Amino acid sequence: MPRLALYALVVCVLAVAAAVVSFVRGGVAIGVVWVLLSGLSSNMCWYYAKRGRDARRADSSTSVTG
């Protein structure tokens, strides 16, 4: 998994934890912001993971000339 995908995954997990803490403490507005941030970071994780996987496939298909 590419490094940027791992960073985005860590941000997603931390944002979900922050959203849970915010909702438990009664901060609904800030909890919604954390949920939105977790959605954004999960999409970034998916994008960078897919981009890395596609790049690996392209490298492996072009290196085989046999």
Image (cartoon, helix red, strand yellow):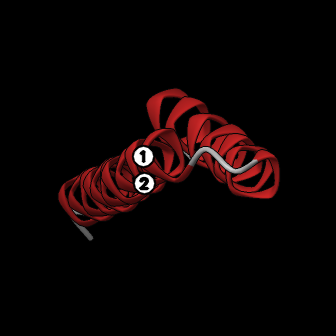
Near-viewer residue (1 or 18): 18
The residue labelled by disc 2 is 32
Around disc 1, counting alpha carbons within 10 Å, would you say few (fewer than 14), some (14 to 19), or many (20 or more)? few
Q: Mark 1 points at which residue?
A: 29
Quadrant position of residue 3: top right
Marks 2 and 1 sit apart, C-alpha to C-alpha, by 5 Å
The picture places residue 44, in percent across and down from the top left corner, at: 32, 48
Tell whether 37 sits left or right of 7. Answer: left
* Residue 33 locus on image (x, y percent): 39, 43
Please give the name of the residue rendered at 69% of the width and 44% of the height, measured from the top-left corner.
Answer: 22
- In the shown orientation, is residue 49 left or right of residue 50? right
Q: What amino acid is found at the position of numbered circle 1 in the picture?
A: Ala
**Residue type of the residue flagged with mark 2:** Val
The percent coordinates of residue 53 (x first, y second) are 38, 61
Q: Which of marks 2 and 1 is in front?
A: 1
Residue at image location 75% in from the left, 56% down from the top: 20
Residue 4: % across, % down? 46, 29
Tell which of 19 and 5 is nearer to you.
19
Residue at image coords 31%, 59%: 43
